[in-house]
Amino acid sequence: MTERLDARTIGNKIVDPRFHAEPGAYHALFRQLRSEAPVFWVEPDEYAPFWLVTKHADIMHVEKSMDLFVNGPRVMLRKTVVDDQIRKVTGGRPFLLNQLPNMDGSEHRYHRKLTQAWFAPARIKVLEEELRGYARDLFDRTLQQDGSIDFMRAVASWYPLRVIMRIIGVPAEDEPMMLKMTQQMFGPDDPEIKTEKFDVISTVQGFFAYFRELLAKRKAEPADDLATLLADADIGEQEALSYFILAATAGHDTTSASIAGGLLALIQSPSEFERLRSDPTLLPTAVDEMVRWVSPVTHFFRTPTEDVELRGASVAAGQAMMMCYPSANRDEEVFEDPFRFDIGRPQHRHLAFGYGPHLCLGQHLAKLEMRIFYEELLSRIDTVVLDGEPRWIQTNFVGGLKSLPIRYSLRETVPA
Ligand code: HEM
């Protein structure tokens, strides 16, 4: 069934967190938009209006032209009332935190360079055995014998958290608190996650207090982590603290969602599961396919600094444009049979990590984590099936599975 493309109706759907918990409906709408109105103006009730950009080529074009399409004015969906609150607190700035995603030009280049080498493939690779240890520990605790488990809650949400906390320098005992805080920030509209009244400002203040203490500790006693790097960097305390928050939040739910969504895709495509088990050298392309398939980051915005034409639409300077990554990753003009999960898809060109100067800083880390996780999982698991309905998180920013009940059996011998 196709929708009547009306600015208010479509706008209200796109901003509705419940809509993102229904991947079928969500992808059907994007398929229609790509074919009928690939650059489409929407006017949701409680948000400032914006353009939806749904084609792969258009998102690449916008994201690589950093001088013409800037991040500063608007980064992600936020209700007008929250925007007003934030501007009141900050004296007119649209952000509580000055972080990479809302920086442009030389400021962005400077701050990105501070940690870019840290996240480069060669640097990240030295963590391989440590990451493998985290995966093994987790499986030893959670998958001891044949059984049933909520894979998302009991397994997938913990491993990326451990990894990113290790990289930042947060000790294991503080992880449950960090998990709660990141979920408050990124899954704020899901009633099962937002069990208590959530206050964005006090959550940010909580993060700040924690990381301020960590910076002080590392100044006194350096270690091999991001906290030490930032404690020594030539930036203000606020900026260092914002960096921690960005890494802690960006590096966690995105990767857990891709891991769990990847397993669901394998369960639903048994031939791909068998193919991967019989040929684990396919894991690097399988991981990219999982990330394309899940595309957990639903959007980031860009705003043109002058009037532009995009695929026939006249976009005025200052009108925000939503980069719809999940839509780009099902674009029929780029991916053959895009709704098929294919672990051997060659030359990945998906945009789940974005594109251009803001391309995800942690993409190599995320891919390494996922490859190791699946190497370890596949060496243990023999069979796996669904044990109930999977459910998706209600959010309009970083999405993915909330619950993935599975029944599994283990292989007889687990390699040492
Ligand atoms: C599968 C997992 C992940 C996905 C799908 C993902 C996706 C994204 C996307 C879409 C962007 C915006 C890119 C753009 O605007 O063009 C981004 C930015 C970013 N990501 Fe990731 N991410 C993942 C994992 C991670 C990890 C593990 C980290 C580790 C710290 C991380 C850190 C960042 C940072 C710092 C930025 C901001 C970069 C900038 O603005 O220059 N991400 N990510």
Image (cartoon, rainbow, N blue to C red):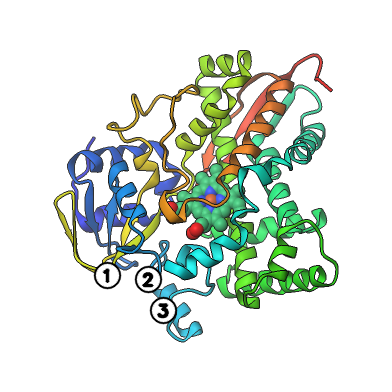
In which quadrant is the N terminus drawn? Answer: top left
**Amino acid tagged 3:** Asp
Q: Is residue 301 left or right of residue 159?
A: left
- Tag 1: residue type? Gly
The residue tagged 1 is 318
Pointer 1 or 3: first along the chain = 3
Label 1: which secondary element: loop
Closer to us: 357 or 161: 357
- Tell me the SS state at disc 3: helix
Q: Nearer the viewer, residue 188 or 225?
A: 225
Q: Is residue 39 left or right of residue 381?
A: left
Q: Are marks 2 and 3 in contact (CB under 8 Å)?
A: no
Could you say which is closer to the camera, residue 90 or residue 21? Answer: 90
Q: CA distance from mark 2 to mark 3?
A: 14 Å
User: For the residue marked with disc 2, what is the amino acid?
Assistant: Pro
Q: Secondary structure at mark 2?
A: loop
Question: Percent position (x, y) of residue 167?
Answer: 72, 53
Examine the rendering and report whether any part of residue 55 can be seen: no
Question: Residue 230 appears at what percent x and percent y?
Answer: 68, 67
- Which dot, 1 or 3, sits closer to the camera? 1
User: Which residue is found at the position 39% from the left and 46% from the top?
Assistant: 325
Report whether the residue tagged 3 is closer than 8 Å to ligand 1: no
Looking at marks 1 and 2 on the same chain, the residue that comes earlier in the sequence is marked by 2
Other residues around mark 3 within 10 Å, as few (<14) / some (14–19) / many (≥20): some
Kindly check if marks 1 and 2 are in contact, taking CB atoms under 8 A apart as contact.
Answer: yes
Q: Position of residue 248 (x, y in %)?
A: 64, 58
Left or right side of 27 for 358: right
Name the residue carrying label 3. 84
Res 73 label: 2
